[in-house]
């Protein structure tokens, strides 16, 4: 088993296609097949079922995927840390749920990075569950997420909040009407958002499009038309240009988010500096 094999498995789990995985990794399709065979032989289990182009993870593959992703993150962290040794820089590994990066957090992190002469950063996007695990295991120093962890050795600080608004390419419809349409995109802004969404729109049937990436929802609206709850901070240009319209009668949903880190971290000083910077900037 080696890193190239693990990277190939993770890419196959994402694309579910040998040709697409090969193209993404800049290798041949036969190399993808060889790497997967060697990985399965090393583990002694089948990770994938192959039926023409219908590739699915086996039960073992599903269990192995989060471990494989963690190994890639750890390897990336190891390479960066050893490479920084001679420069005497501290590596700060920062994770966030996907939608927070897209809603403007990345710009604030970039601004903070410019103020730090002795800090290098590694930016990671993960699900909330993956972030919890990465912080506890030490491959991520701190994470930004919507829910406060109920774990004894993790600390959390309230940083800011997002103003989520219902927007649409349909300017002549009310909130209930746009959400009932087939082109409504449900964006996963966390559990509390889902609960409030169900409260405000109790009679809405199952959504036909559900995404974790707010950017995908925005791209879909621009290219095909439709509606979605999006962070106001990420659509200021579209609103000003009338590419998207604010649905005035829709409730605004506010989502607080938190900085989470391990209690006994040795990087507490720079983490506190980052927290102070973000709170001051909001």
Image (spheres, rainbow, N blue to C red):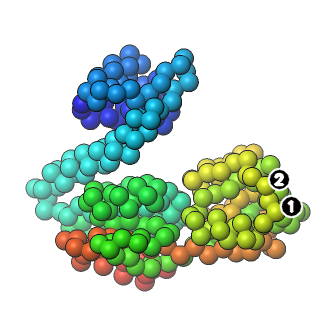
Q: Residue at x 58, y 65 (%)?
A: 191
CB contact under 8 Å: marks 1 and 2: yes
* Residue at mark 2: 181
Q: Residue at x 38, y 19 (%)?
A: 33
Instruction: Report x, y in % for residue 26.
Output: 38, 27
Instruction: Report x, y in % for residue 276.
Output: 36, 81
Q: Residue at x 37, y 39 (%)?
A: 64
Q: Is residue 57 visible?
A: yes
Q: Secondary structure at mark 1?
A: helix
Judge whether 214 appears above or below 47 on screen: below
Q: Residues within 10 Å of mark 2 (few under 14, many from 20)?
A: some
Number of the label disc, if any, that sits on residue 26: none
Q: Quadrant of residue 116?
A: bottom left
- Most foreground residue, 265 or 222: 265
- Most foreground residue, 35 or 274: 35
Q: Residue at x 75, y 71 (%)?
A: 200
Instruction: Report x, y in % for residue 137.
Output: 27, 58
- Most foreground residue, 198 or 23: 198
Judge whether 82 appears above or below 128 on screen: above
Q: Secondary structure at mark 2?
A: loop
| Residue most extreme to the right | 172
Number of the label disc, if any, that sits on residue 177: 1
Q: Quadrant of residue 30?
A: top left
Gap between marks 1 and 2 measured at Cα: 7 Å
Judge whether 167 appears above or below 11 on screen: below
């Amino acid at each position: 088993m080696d890193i190239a094999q693990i990277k190939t498995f993770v890419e196959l789990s994402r694309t579910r296609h040998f040709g697409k995985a090969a193209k993404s990794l800049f290798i041949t399709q036969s190399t993808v097949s060889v790497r997967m065979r060697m990985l399965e032989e090393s583990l002694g289990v089948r990770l994938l079922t192959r039926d023409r182009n219908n590739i699915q993870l086996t039960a073992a593959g599903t269990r192995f995927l989060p471990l494989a992703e963690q190994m890639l993150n750890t390897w990336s962290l190891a390479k960066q840390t050893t490479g920084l040794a001679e420069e005497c820089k501290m590596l700060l590994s920062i994770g966030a749920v996907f939608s927070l990066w897209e809603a403007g957090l990345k710009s604030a992190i970039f601004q903070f990075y410019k103020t730090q002469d002795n800090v290098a950063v590694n930016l990671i996007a993960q699900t909330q569950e993956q972030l919890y695990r990465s912080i506890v295991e030490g491959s991520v120093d701190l994470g930004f997420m919507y829910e406060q962890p109920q774990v004894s050795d993790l600390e959390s600080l309230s940083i800011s909040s997002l103003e989520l608004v219902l927007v649409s390419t349909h300017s002549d419809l009310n909130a209930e009407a746009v959400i009932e349409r087939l082109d409504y995109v449900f964006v996963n802004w966390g559990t509390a958002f889902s609960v409030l969404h169900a409260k405000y729109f109790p009679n809405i049937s199952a959504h036909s499009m559900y995404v974790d990436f707010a950017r995908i929802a925005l791209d879909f609206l621009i290219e095909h038309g439709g509606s979605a709850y999006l962070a106001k901070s990420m659509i200021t240009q579209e609103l000003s240009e009338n590419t998207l319209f604010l649905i005035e009668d829709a409730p605004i949903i506010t989502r607080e988010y938190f900085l989470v880190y391990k209690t006994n971290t040795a990087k507490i000083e720079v983490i506190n500096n980052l927290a102070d910077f973000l709170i001051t900037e909001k």
